[in-house]
Amino acid sequence: MKDAKLVLKQEGSRNTKIRIGSSTIGGNELFIVGGPCSIESLEQMEQVAIALSHGPVQAIRGGAFKPRTSPYSFQGLGIEGLKILSEINQRFNVPVITELMTESQIPDIVQHADVLQIGSRNMQNFDLLKAVGTAGKPVILKRGLAATLEEFILAAEYIMAHGNPNVILCERGIRSFDTFTRNVLDLGAVVALKQLTHLPVLVDPSHAAGKSELIADLAKAAVACGADGLMIECHPQPKKSVSDARQALSLEQMLDLIESLRLIALAVGRNIPSVKEHRSAELPPLMIGQTDFPAMLQVADLIA
């Protein structure tokens, strides 16, 4: 990997810390991202934001443009989804993350999102990697379905070589012969990436497991082996999710999972932040005609 001049650790170099909103990924504080696979409506994202912004979650994810295996599956709300994500960002004072698939989407996504995500299918879309190198936003780069660590690291090198030092690596599982889980979560790769590179490393146990009941234990293992943070799918009503319903946690399960990580984080020299002081303890104002007030109160009761 001699060509990975910018990504690999150099003698005496420090680990990279990337500022996202009021939080930092790459330091002692675990960076936790939660949210649904796809943005379905403003009401859905409001419910997610109410729950997660009152808990120790530093960013909310949601897909506006979705790469789907079948051309007949839900492809996302597009620009309308980005507008919803932007409104959530403004009203709840929480950074938002979304995936981009093509260079043409960059101007719109940069306008609405704090962090760009490159999905596993696009890990070696080299023109896209070059383009996000000049986008001026932090980038989460997910490992490809069958990518070697060298290929993964060199994909990150493309982004950094084109001017963007704020790259976050994300292990999300690799394909194997076994079909019990959606993918195989390669925690050995997490350890190796922390040793080889200076970049922050996230783990996405949701896409690795593909089954909600496996996510909590995989998340704990990821923290124990040195991951800088987690990206976990959650939904107000998981069974009704239009995409990846089988792997989505409920909002209550998401918050319970985060609390269960505290002792493990402490044991490995990490910490999970308390509820952010700068976030209001009161619910944000409702948008009449677009919000289901009883549903929002029900979610608020779960976290009270």
Image (tube, helix red, strand yellow):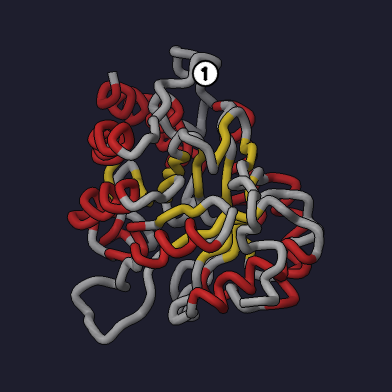
Q: What is the three-letter code of the residue carrying label 1?
A: Arg
- Residue occupying the point 47% across, 51% down: 40
- Residue occupying the point 62% across, 38% down: 20
- Residue occupying the point 77% across, 66% down: 161
- Percent across and percent down for residue 279 are 52, 18
Quadrant of the rendering where the C terminus is positioned: top left
The residue pinned by badge 1 equals: 279
- Relative vertical location of residue 41 with respect to residue 159 in this rendering, above or below: above
- Percent across and percent down for residue 295 are 33, 30
Q: Is residue 118 visible?
A: yes
- Percent across and percent down for residue 49 are 46, 33
- Relative vertical location of residue 276 with respect to residue 145 in this rendering, above or below: above
Q: Is residue 99 visible?
A: no
- Residue occupying the point 35% across, 68% down: 186
Quick one: label 1, few (<14), some, or many (20+) residues within 10 Å?
A: some
| Quarter holding residue 33 | top left
Residue 247 falls left or right of residue 153: left
